[in-house]
Amino acid sequence: MTAISIEYTETFERQVSACSQYLARYIGQSQARGLIFNFIDMLEQRVIRYPESSPLCEEAADLGFTNYRDFILPDQQFRAIYRLEEEKAYMMLFLKSRQSIRRRSYNIVCGLSNEI
């Protein structure tokens, strides 16, 4: 098995930052960062070990993107949408588990707010 490397898009990084800032208002900066970094650590471990284990993202497929995977941790209410290409996993979107990919994608394309 080939080693998978992970690349984070600017959009993913901005969404992580926005989520961290939002959560910090309610639970404090340290705890917000801890929750998000724990999620990202679990995401990385899963993608590196079992890159195709997350299901294909049905919402993305409805938009015509058929090679995106959906990593969700329901207890943390976070999800990450990633794309696999050969030995790389591109982290595309970081969302709360109930957020709509269609709405988030529209906001990104139109340059609207990146807030949670």
Image (cartoon, rainbow, N blue to C red):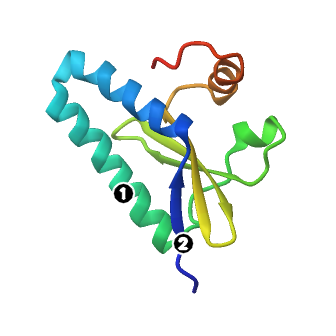
Residue 22 as seen in the image, left or right of residue 9? left
Q: Position of residue 75 (x, y in %)?
A: 34, 41
State the residue in front, 86 or 97. Answer: 86
Determine if residue 52 is in view: no
**Residue shown at 52% from the left, 79% from the top:** 3
The quadrant the N terminus occupies is: bottom right
Query: How crowded is the residue under tag 2: few (<14 C-alpha within 10 Å), some, or many (20+)?
Result: some
Residue, disc 2: 4
Q: How far apart, in angstroms, are the residues tagged by discs 1 and 2?
A: 15 Å
Task: State the mark number for residue 72.
Answer: none
Q: In which quadrant of the rendered view does residue 64 lie?
A: top right
Residue 65 as seen in the image, left or right of residue 17? right
Residue ranking furthest to the bottom: 1
**Residue shown at 57% from the left, 58% from the top:** 54
Which one is in front in this view, the residue at disc 1 or the one at disc 2?
2
Q: Say how many tags the image has.
A: 2
Of labels 1 and 2, earlier in sequence is 2
State the residue in front, 6 or 34. Answer: 6
- Amino acid type indicated by mark 1: Met
Above or below 53: residue 41: above
Q: Helix, strand, or loop for circle 2?
A: loop
Q: Position of residue 97 (x, y in %)?
A: 48, 33
- Amino acid type indicated by mark 2: Ile
Above or below 10: residue 113: above
Query: How crowded is the residue under tag 1: few (<14 C-alpha within 10 Å), some, or many (20+)?
Result: some
Residue ranking furthest to the right: 64
Above or below 45: residue 16: above
Task: State the mark number for residue 42.
Answer: 1
Q: Helix, strand, or loop for circle 1?
A: helix
Q: Position of residue 67 (x, y in %)?
A: 74, 54
The quadrant the C terminus occupies is: top left
**Residue shown at 39% from the left, 65% from the top:** 45
